[in-house]
Amino acid sequence: MSKKDSEYLINRKDNQYEVVIGLEVHAQVLSESKLFSTSATKFGAEPNTQVSLVDAAFPGMLPVINEFCVKQAIKTGIGLNAKINKRSVFDRKNYFYADLPQGYQISQFKDPIVGEGKVILDMPNSQKEVGIERLHLEQDAGKSIHDLDLQNTFVDLNRSGVALMEIVSKPDLRSPDEVNAYIKKLRSIMRYLGTCDGNMQEGSLRADVNVSVRPKGSKEFGTRCEIKNVNSIKFMQMAIEYEANRQVDLIEEGKTIDQETRLFDTKKNETRSMRSKEDAHDYRYFPDPDLLPLEVSEKFIEELKNDIPELPDDKKKRFIEEFKLSSYEANILVSDIDTAKYFEEVVAKMGKNKDIKLAVNWITGELFAVLNSKGLEISQSPVSAKNFAILINLIKNGTISGKIAKTVFELMIDGDKDPQKIVEEKGLKQQSDPKALEALIDKIINDNREKAIEYKQGKEKLFGFFVGQAMKASGGKANPQLINEILKKKL
Amino acid sequence: MSDITKQSLTELVENIKNKKLSSTDVTKAFIDRSEKSVELNAYITNDFTSALDKAKKFDQKPNLDLKLPGIPMAVKDLFCTKDIKTTAGSKILNNFVPTYESTVTENIWNEGAILLGKLNCDEFAMGSSNETSFFGNVQSPIDKNLVPGGSSGGSASAVAGQLTPVTIGTDTGGSIRQPASFTGIVGLKPTYGSCSRYGIVAFASSLDQAGPMAQNVKDCALLHEVISSYDPKDSTSIEFKRNHYSKELTNNIKGKKIGIPKEYRVDGMPKEIEDLWQKGIQYIKDCGAETIDISLPNTSYALPTYYIVAPAEASSNLARYDGVKYGFRAKGENLIDMYEKTRSEGFGAEVQRRIMIGTYVLSSGYYDAYYLKAQKVRKLIKNDFDEAYKKVDAILTPSTPSSAFKIGEKTNDPVSMYLNDIFTVPVNLAGLPGISIPAGHDSKGYPLGLQIIGKAFDEQNILNIAYAMEEKINFKNKITDWWIK
C-alpha cells in the first residue's frame, strides 16, 4: 500500500537534477457565443462566417461581457477549489498581429476572476496536490493561415473573441507523468462541470509549459523557459523531456540558461528559441476603458455553487464507499464523466440483485476493448447501459456462463440488441437442470472408464478433462458450477 | 418663408408641425446655404441628394408627433453612419463606409431628422483648432482667419454659419465646448454614460461623450433629450431617469448656489476673460441665484493628467487601424513593413504624436509613474468636484482661457494648443456634464463663452441655469456671411 511513486530525475555523472514544471492551460469556455459578442463559436465552420463587427474590431464597436462565460469561469474556479474574486478587471494586452483585429487582446492581468486553488492528482501509488495560481478570462485571437498562398497570408477570424480560461498552475509539477495526470484531471473536472469540452484535437485545450531544472534537493528555482502553445499531452511530455535535458546539459557544460520563450518542433522533437527575455513584448497592459470592473455578488456565486455537480474526487470517494470498489477501479470509472455516467446507469438498471464487481470488470474489459477497436467514445457506445445491465444480470443469475456472455456481447454490438432475446433465439441458455446434466455426465464417465479409474487413483488433473468433455457435450451451455458438483459426486 | 436657415431648431420644428414649412422647404434651404458655403470646408461628405429625397418622402406622410420631424441635420464625421462614408477626419478611414449606425445618430433619425452630411473634425478628434483634419482646416464663420476650435470644428462652423439647424459633436477634453465658445454657439458635454458611445469612432473611451451643439439653450435641450439613452451595446452606458429636458426647461433658478472656483483664475489669462467671468457672476445674481467661492485644489493637475490618460487610451484604441481589415493600406514588403507604412502615411502628425505619448506612458517601467499616477490624480480631481457639490448646485467658469486664435497660430506649438483645454478637461476627467454658452465678445468682436459644470446626471439643472443666463446675456452672434460670394 505504501509503495511510493518513483521520482523523475535527470542523471548526469555524479549529479541528479529535478525538473520543475508549471503550466498555463488555455481552455476554451464551452459557450454558444463569444466572450464579448454574440457570434457563434462552432468548430469547423467556413472561415470568417462567425465574425461580428465587434470581433473584427470595426470603428466604434464595443465589447459587452457574456454573462454565461463569466458563470462558466466561476464554476471552473469552484471546481478547482479556488477563491472566487468578487471584483475582477479586464485589461488590454496590446500587440500587433494580423489575426488580432483590435490590436489588443482583452484579458485579465492584475485582478483575475479566480484566485488560488488546488487539484489533487491520482498517481499510481500516491496522491499529489498541485496548486492553482489563478484563472482568468480572455479572448482568443483569430487564425493566420500561411500555407494557402505563396505571397499572402489568409486570416480566419472565427476564433477571434472566443472565450478562453487561462488556468495557471503553481510550479508544483515534477515529471511528464504528473503533467499528464494534471492535464487529464483538469480536463476531467471541466468536463464534469460542462465548462470546457477538453477537446485537444480541436484546440479547446492547449498549454504553455514552463520548465526549469535544479540539483536534486535544492530549494531555489532554476531559470525557466516557456514552451509556447503545445496542443497535446504527448507533445507536452516530449517537450518537457527534451527541454529539461537541454537545460541540464547547459548546466553540466558550465553554461547558463537564458530565460526565453521557446517553440516545440513536433517533427524534430526539439524545442528552439522563439524570443529572448530582452525581445519580450511589452504588452502595455492597462484596464480596458470600454468595460467596467466585473463585480459578482455572494449570492451569484452561491447560486453557481448549488449548480455544481458531483466532481470526480467526490464521486471516486462515493464509488469506493458505496460500491466497494478499489481506488484503482474507481479512478478508471470517474476520470471521464461519460464513463462514470454509463457505469452508474448500468448499476441503476441492474436492479436489486446486482454484481457490481462483475459490471466493473465487464466495462473496463470487454466494453473498453470494443470502444477502443472501433475508436468510439463511451457516449457513443454501441451497447446501451440498459442492455449491458441485462447482460451482467444474465451472468449473475446463472442464465448464461461468462464464456457464452462474450458470444452474446459480440452479437449485441450490432444494433444494441437485447441480450435476453439473443439468448432465447440462439438457444444459449445455460443448462442448469441437474437431472439432464447427471445423465450427460454418466454417459461421459461411461465412455471414458479408464480415465475415470486413473482419476480415482489420484491423477487429479484429469478432473479438468471431464469438465471439458461435459461442456463440449452441452455445446458450452452447461452450468459450470453444477458440472463441477456432479462430477465430484460421480467420480 | 424667408431666412429659414436663421430659424432655431425649436422654431423649425414648430413651423413644420404647424405646416407653415415642409421638410422639403427646410432641407432645401440648408442644402442651398451649405452649397454656398464650400469655403468654410465644414463638410467632409454631403448626402444632399438623398436628404432631399427623404424630405420629400417625409412630406408625403409626415409624422408630426416626432421630436425632430423632417429636420435636416449634419453630424460630426466621428459618428458611424450606415452606408455613408465615415472618416474621423483621417486618411486612414478615407474610404471607410460603415454597414452600421451609431446609437446616437440612430436616435436622431428615429425622431424624424434627416442626414445632410458629415462634418469636418480634427483627425480622430485630436485637436483644438480643426487643423489636424486630413480634409483640411475649417474656417470660422466669425472671421476668415480664425479657427473654429476643435475637435468639433466643422460642427461649430456649420451651426454658427447656419449650414445645419443643430448638430452633434463629441467631447473628450473640450471638443464640443471649446469650438462652441469660439463660434458663439451653445454646446453641451453630457455626463459620461448618458449618450451611447456605440458606433462613435473612439478616441479616449473613458472620456469620450457625444453631445448637442445648437444656436440656443432650448434647441440644445431638445437635441440632448433625443440623443441621451441607455444602450446595452455600450457597457459604460448608464441607466438613470432621463428628463424631457426641453419640456422641463425653466429660467427659474432662484436660490441656486453656483460655485466660483478660484483655481480657474490662471496665470496669463486675458483680462477680457476675467471680466466676462465677473459679468457671468452678475448675471447669475440677477437671476436670483447665489454665487459662492469654492476651491477645486487639484485643477492645475488636470491638463497633464488628461494628456496622459487620453493618449494612453488612444494609442490602444487606434491600434485597430492597421491596414488589414478596412481603411487605407500601404503596400509593404511584409506584415511589419505594411503596418509601418500604413500607419505612417495614414495618420497625421498630431495623431502620431499622441500615439507615441500614449505608448510611452503605458510602457513597462513608466506605467506606474505616468498612467497609474494619472489615474490617481483623476480620482482626486473627481473628489474635488464631489466636495464642492456638497455646497453648490453648479459651477461657473470661463469656457476657454482666450477667444479663438488665428489659423496656423498654434500649429507648431502643441503645448500652447493643449492649454486651450485647461477649463474643459477637468469636467471630462470627472465624468460630469458641462455646457458652454456664448456670453460676450472680446475687443476684436470674437465670441467668448462661459461654462456651467453640473453634478453627474444633472443636465437639467445646468440647462436651466444656461437658459436663465442666456436670457440676461442676450448674445447676438456677429455673422457677416463673409464666405458667401
Image (cartoon, coloured by chain):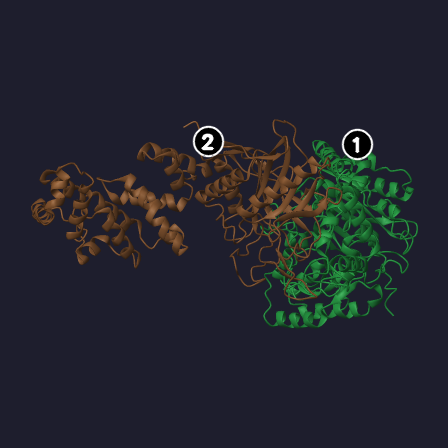
Chain colours: A brown, B green
Q: Is residue B370 left or right of residue A370?
A: right
Pointer 1: what residue?
Answer: B297
Can you give x and y, in whole percent of width and height, for residue B222 in the image?
67, 54
Residue B351 or A328: which is nearer the viewer?
A328
Residue in the foreground of this view, choosing between A256 and B255: A256
For mark 2, name the chain: A
Q: How far apart are marks 1 and 2 (CA)?
A: 65 Å
Pick the front one: B334 or A454: A454
> Picture quarter containing residue B90?
bottom right
At label 2, which amino acid type do we have? Ser
- Number of callouts in the render? 2
Decide which of A286, B134 is in the foreground and name it. Answer: A286
Residue B253 visible in the picture? no
The x, y position of residue B38, in whole percent, is 82, 67
Q: Is residue B59 above or below residue A81?
A: below
Element at label 1: loop
Chain ID of residue with mark 1: B
Residue A126 numbered tag: 2
Q: What residue type is labelled 1?
A: Pro
Q: On the rendered image, what quadrant is the C terminus of chain A found in? A: top left
- Which residue corresponds to the image point at 49% horizontal and 36% vertical from the top-left? A78
Q: In which quarter of the image is the N terminus of chain A?
A: top left
Identify which residue is drawn at 71% across, 33% down. Answer: B383
